[in-house]
Image (cartoon, coloured by chain):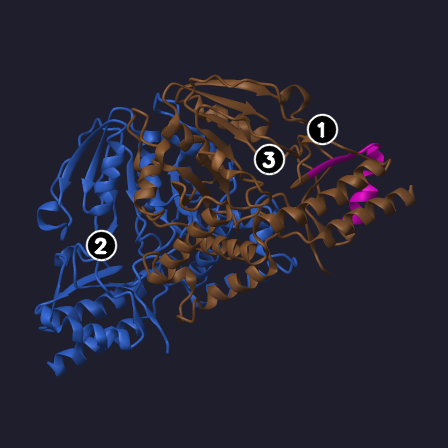
Chain colours: A brown, B blue
């Protein structure tokens, strides 16, 4: 049976990518060797790393604008720490829009003073705070563009006097933005970019080198920039599959085309959530995520029936996160609209049944 | 043409592992989904992580002895930092046997006083220092069991009053040792255990929690132990392939059988290095690594001839590291003795030619 994969991450990647990625395990570039057994210093892999970095900057429209793209290890969780290590001298401002922002704030507090400029914790993070002010004198302002767990997404980003840092783990490469507004963007690969195990960091070089502390080599963006993400052995395979996925994004129309597809998928499911009396959306309407639609049953007693229906239809990963309950449809770039239609049809079917 | 892969790392893994690893990219456990697109919290992947951790402890003979096995990100380079973060309160002792020890010392110095108890830098690290004493009152003693670049290997480990910490990146699972002598062992996967992108840390729990500093979550062994290596998204695929490789080691007789095979391969090449008047070994005889044999031409003018010969014979990765020059035959667990025979035959052939 065909699977419809709504997993929140690691998540669906393009089928073409899986095919090429599987082949490279047996024989990479007709070398007679697996990509898993070659040196990361070999010309074939150096070319992969170079292409991945170049594609990331190109797709984001940041080529030649003073940015470097890095593929590091440790996920966004490591970036919570590295951002503070590299940029926090005295005080930074954070917007708290959910679980990941909260964790980022916790780690940064070990390195300096943190001003939480606003938080949506009062309503279990079901909205994005809007009227807040960012002090001028902070070292940087940090926000999370998309909140996978709560299904909210920032539609606008503030103008800041200080560097703008953004965790875009769950919506990078999914919508057009003026990425040059940002000074540092980081994203765990395992949503729109690749498999788990590598993290993209796009950093404007001129914001670095301004803190007085001595930074351990592995924590320092400058170290990794100086060695083109090869200071130590990178996550070879995760970078390779990310490169394949970035190629796929480019070949399929770039971020603009991804955004159009994603918008259609989101409209399809949100329209049904709003129309169908059995369901209600979790996130505030104006802050709804195009990536992760969170919704609940109005009457929880239908849960077993609906769960049986979607599990029987080959749908995977539709359960909501425990802190929200209900359902979450994660609709990353590679998810076809047909899969969303399957869920929408099931929602209609449930309505008829009840 | 069949390839003979002597790459120093990432390096050869068993062919059976490549086959299963390639298949899982297309369809993992007959789930209809790629292993790259499933949640790390899914029962199928949790089972992989559990098995990998259990196999690591079992193969090392450390089951039920107070140790935890973790699969983290960042390579041994991240462990240089994490060891110091978690264990260094005032002063630690380090044995300097090469490039990696030197880097470990550099990172640890940011956290406390480091006493370098001995170093073989005076002879470009071609031997392992032996008569040194470790102060009783240090927080731990750190050493590197095998030096990939220089081709030296510690045959004996000191008894210490303080915790014994060892970087076993390039020889773990290759030889029998009393692993219970060690309090913390770490190893980047990309030699005998798996692909690049994950790092095994085996730590005796009772050595933790003794430093006064506040440790960032991602740097803390206790964080990762508390979440069974799932504090944040792990490097799913690298852990999976490591698990397959650990299964292969167990199915093929465990570490004992690996050691026997590795000894035979090492004897084969070292005998030829010693016999053949055109070559000389780099490392001191008594400290020669069973994993990485480093050797040079007596007369460098034969270099082009020999290079052409081995490259033409499908041999990969035989070039020595720039700091040693000459050649390096890395003979990890998965390398068949037939590949070593090919190189030995080429060395004999060169002798006849000259």
Frontmost residue, B117 versus A65 = A65
Q: Label 2, label 1: how many angstroms apart (C-alpha)?
A: 57 Å
Q: Which residue is mark 2?
A: B149
Q: Label 1, label 3: how many angstroms apart (C-alpha)?
A: 14 Å
Relative vertical location of residue B290 with respect to residue B104 in this rendering, above or below: below
Badge 3 crowding class, 10 Å Cα cut-off, few under 14, some 14 to 19, many 20 or more, is: many
Farthest bottom residue? B352
Which of the chains bears the disc numbered 2? Answer: B
- Mark 3 vs mark 2: in front: 3
Which of the chains bears the disc numbered 3? Answer: A
- Residue A304 in the magenta stretch? The answer is yes
Discs 3, 2 touching: Cβ within 8 Å: no
Residue drawn at 42 percent across, 62 percent down: A35
Q: Are marks 3 and 2 on the same chain?
A: no
Badge 1 crowding class, 10 Å Cα cut-off, few under 14, some 14 to 19, many 20 or more, is: some
Quadrant containing the C terminus of chain A is: top right
Q: What range is drawn magenta here? A: A293-310
Which of the chains bears the disc numbered 1? Answer: A
Circle 3: element type = strand
Circle 2: element type = loop
Position of A209 with respect to A336 (left or right) is left
Tell me the tag on residue A284.
Answer: 1
Position of A119 with respect to B351 (left or right) is right
- Residue B83 in the magenta stretch? The answer is no
Q: Residue A301: name its quadrant.
A: top right
Circle 1: element type = loop
Q: Which residue is mark 3?
A: A146
Frontmost residue, A314 versus A251 = A251
Residue A150: x %, y % from top left: 65, 32
Q: Main secondary structure of the magenta part?
A: helix
Residue B183 visible in image: no
- N-term-proximal mark, 1 vs 3: 3
């Amino acid at each position: 049976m065909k699977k419809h994969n709504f997993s929140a991450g690691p998540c669906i990647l393009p089928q073409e990518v899986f095919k090429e990625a599987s082949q490279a395990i047996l024989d990479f570039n007709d070398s007679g060797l697996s990509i898993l057994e070659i040196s990361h210093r070999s010309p074939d892999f150096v070319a992969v790393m170079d292409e991945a970095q170049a594609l990331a900057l190109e797709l984001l429209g940041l080529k030649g604008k003073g940015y470097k793209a890095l593929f590091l290890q440790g996920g966004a969780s490591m970036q919570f720490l590295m951002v503070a290590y590299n940029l926090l001298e005295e005080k930074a401002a954070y917007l708290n829009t959910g679980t990941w922002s909260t964790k980022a704030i916790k780690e940064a507090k070990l390195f300096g003073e943190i001003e939480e400029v606003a938080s949506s914790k009062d309503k279990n993070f079901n909205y994005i705070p809007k009227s807040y002010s960012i002090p001028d004198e902070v070292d940087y302002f940090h926000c999370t563009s998309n909140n996978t767990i709560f299904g909210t997404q920032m539609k606008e980003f503030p103008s800041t006097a200080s560097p703008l840092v953004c965790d875009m783990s769950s919506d990078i490469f999914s919508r057009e933005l003026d990425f040059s507004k940002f000074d540092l963007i980081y994203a765990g690969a395992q949503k729109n970019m690749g498999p788990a195990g590598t993290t993209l960091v796009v950093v404007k070089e001129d914001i670095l080198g301004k803190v007085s502390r001595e930074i351990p080599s592995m924590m320092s963006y400058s170290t990794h920039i100086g060695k083109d993400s090869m200071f130590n052995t990178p996550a070879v395979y995760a970078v390779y599959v990310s490169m394949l996925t970035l190629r796929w994004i480019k070949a399929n129309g770039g971020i603009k085309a991804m955004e159009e597809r994603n918008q259609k998928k989101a409209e399809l499911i949100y329209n049904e959530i709003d129309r169908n009396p059995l369901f209600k959306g979790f996130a505030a309407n104006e802050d709804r995520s195009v990536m992760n639609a969170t919704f609940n049953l109005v009457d929880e007693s239908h849960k077993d029936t609906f769960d049986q229906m979607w599990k029987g239809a080959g749908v995977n990963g539709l359960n909501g996160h425990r802190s929200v309950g209900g359902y979450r449809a994660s609709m990353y770039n590679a998810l076809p609209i047909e899969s969303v239609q399957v869920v929408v049809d099931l929602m209609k079917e449930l309505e008829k049944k009840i």
